[in-house]
Amino acid sequence: MGGCASTRLPGKYSNNIGAEVVTKQMITRRTVVGSLAGLAGAAVVSGKEAAAQTSPAPKVGAQQWDVVVIGAGVFGSWTAWKLLKQGKKVLLVDAWGPSNSRASSAGESRLTRTEYGGDEIYTRFAWESLPDWIALSKKAELPVFHPVGALYIYQKEQDTLAASMALNKKLGAPMHRIERAELLKNYPQLGLDGIRFGVLQPTMGAIMARRGVQMVVKEFVAEGGTYKQLAIQPPKPGAALDAITSTSGETVRAKQFIFACGPWLPKLFPEVIGTKIVPTRQEIFFFSPDAGDIRFDPPQLPAWVDADEPGVPYGFPSLETRGFKLAIDAHGPRVDPDTNDRIISAEGLKQVRAYMARRFPGVSKRPLSESRVCQYENSDNGDFIIDKHPKWDNVLLVGGGSGHGFKHGPAVGRYVSELAVGKLAKVEARFALSSHKYQG
């Protein structure tokens, strides 16, 4: 996805897969040289360069893999890496490349937070994932994680907030209530009309989405995994699935298959997924502050969520000088991820400018410096879909990130990998296919 990051506040559901990274040849550890510039840096390893540096990689169809992961987004890439660490021979494939511009895991930034209204599953997943993102950031040439903090502002008291703060305290995740007077003092760039209080998570912040996914794939390859850019045809019905076929006719055999294809899951499995996952069009806006105005840069401004405002606006300070980012979490119109034009609407821009005039007047009339259109891939209730295919025991389906999935990538990767190797006896009920309804 081209820049989305949903807040997925309790009761407000809004999602995330996997660019500008690799050539269409297969990449293994033997074809990775130096800093793996083709995956995480500015340069791309060309086919000629790779051939000169190493012996040719084996053809994908010439061997059987323990696991093939289809979809190099945040769920698929972390799953592949976690499986590799468990000793599996893993192939990761994607139709366009890790964190490509069509993907739900693409774009600039994602909010990481553990404010889930006391929802233990997602609070724990987010908290478990944060150390992995921080460790990945330390390995990267440029930051993957910016600890700018996460600020939620509220117009009224929240029934779920006490449970959330108690759970965060139990986990050791800092979370502080800030009254209106302190908000006025600490964040003078915020228009606080109607706001009663805020909640700050100082150790949270922003994950650089495209860079993060590409860095995961880089590390996966460096440690012995194999990546190939490959578009997969929908699997044919049958008693078993022991191979998949690419659109170019290449056959890939494996003991297990994990499909983490985000908004493309319904196309690959129309009878099983159907409208249990619905992609929606989401618009993202970046505005350029006045020259020399640092009020909208970190640390003066954290990432933020206007929790009680219709549509739940959210955004980020000017990360790496890209500009002040703002988006509306409400679901946009349904789209096809293959044909969706990535151009913002005049109405969307008008809507966010009207909102900024109240909450961020210092940038409300400033130029639009960048814009993105991406997609959420929503389940009916915002819960992930992580379950076995109803007919094929060796196939796992992973998706339904619903706009809030990106931050959970490491925990989802761990969870899916443990399901695949049999360390988990059964699927969490909320993630089961049977727990999700078809959407009209």
Image (tube, rainbow, N blue to C red):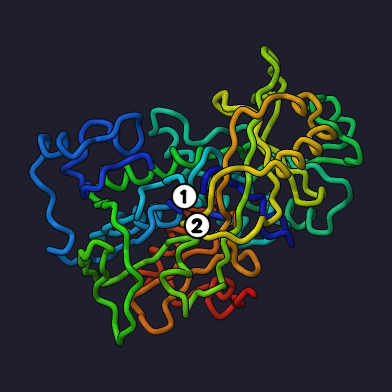
Q: Is any atom of residue 318 visible in this view? A: no
| Left or right, residue 378 beside residue 35 | right
Q: What residue type is labelled 1?
A: Arg
The image shows residue 266 at horizontal and vertical percentages of 48, 70
Residue beneath the point at 66% across and 55% down: 332
Label 1 CA crowd tier, 10 Å (few <14, some 14–19, many 20+):
many
User: Residue tagged by mark 1?
Assistant: 102
Secondary structure found at label 1 = loop
Q: Is any atom of residue 412 visible in this view? A: yes
Residue beneath the point at 65% across and 58% down: 333
- Distance from the alpha carbon under mark 1 to that under mark 2: 7 Å
Note whether 263 is above or below 200 in the view shown.
below
Note whether 382 is above or below 169 in the view shown.
below
The image shows residue 201 at horizontal and vertical percentages of 68, 40
Along the line of sight, the residue nearer the viewer: 127 or 91 = 91
Residue at the limit of the structure toward the left, as seen here: 55
